[in-house]
Amino acid sequence: RMGSWKLNFATQQLELSKELLSILEINAEKPVSIPLEQYLDRHVMLEDQATVIEELSKALHHKTDKNYEANFSYRLITAKGNLRYLFTKGKLIDDVSGFGISQDVSSEQEAEQALLKREQTFRLLAEHSEDIITEHLPDGTVQYISPSVQTVLGYRPEEVLKNQIMNWIISENKDVTT
């Protein structure tokens, strides 16, 4: 989902589109204009407020550069208390006004966090296992091997990485694996 916004730097008024208000879980039939400070205080995570202010300041600083485009991400809290991640792009449209689009990237961010957690769990299990655990490409190139390879076979993991898995199988067992 995406929504647009318009900021008047002189008055510090921020106009939010119906779509952006929907992302904020605010029901409105038409765009709403609020003070920027109110938006920051009510919706932008405290840790991200400095980033938003800095990026808006940079845009204003680059007002003579018509090609300058601000790009940044931040977290916000909706009117119902839900956490959302926004990716925002904006440009100055004249000396005092900026216009931009914000996209809700919460599902992508959550998927990335879940993947990271799964990878960390796998690494934790693999690095503490007494079994040799490997990840390899379809052509057999070893991408990951657990540290237990040193205890079990006497090789350091870096000796095995980027080599073909078949190079490490004893010749009498190769017939069984192919």
Image (cartoon, rainbow, N blue to C red):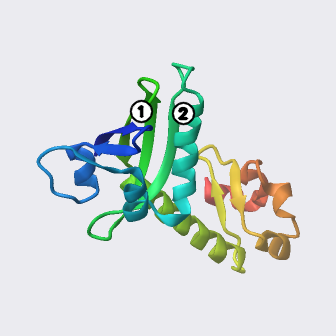
Residue appearing at x 80%, y 56% in the figure: 160
The percent coordinates of residue 102 (x first, y second) are 37, 43
- Residue type (three-letter) at the residue carrying disc 1: Gly
Quarter of the image holding residue 93?
A: top left
Q: Residue furthest left?
A: 29
* Residue underneath mark 2: 60
In this image, 177 relative to 8: left or right? Answer: right
The percent coordinates of residue 125 (x first, y second) are 63, 77
Q: Please give the label number shown on residue 145.
A: none
Label 2 crowd (10 A; few <14 / some 14-19 / many >=20): many
Separation of residues labelled 1 and 2 (CA atoms): 8 Å
Instruction: Check disc 2 and report its element: helix, strand or loop.
Output: helix
* Residue underneath mark 1: 98
- Residue type (three-letter) at the residue carrying disc 2: Leu
The percent coordinates of residue 8 (x first, y second) are 39, 37
Instruction: Check disc 1 and report its element: helix, strand or loop.
Output: strand
Asked if disc 1 and disc 2 are in contact, CB closer than 8 Å, the reply is: yes
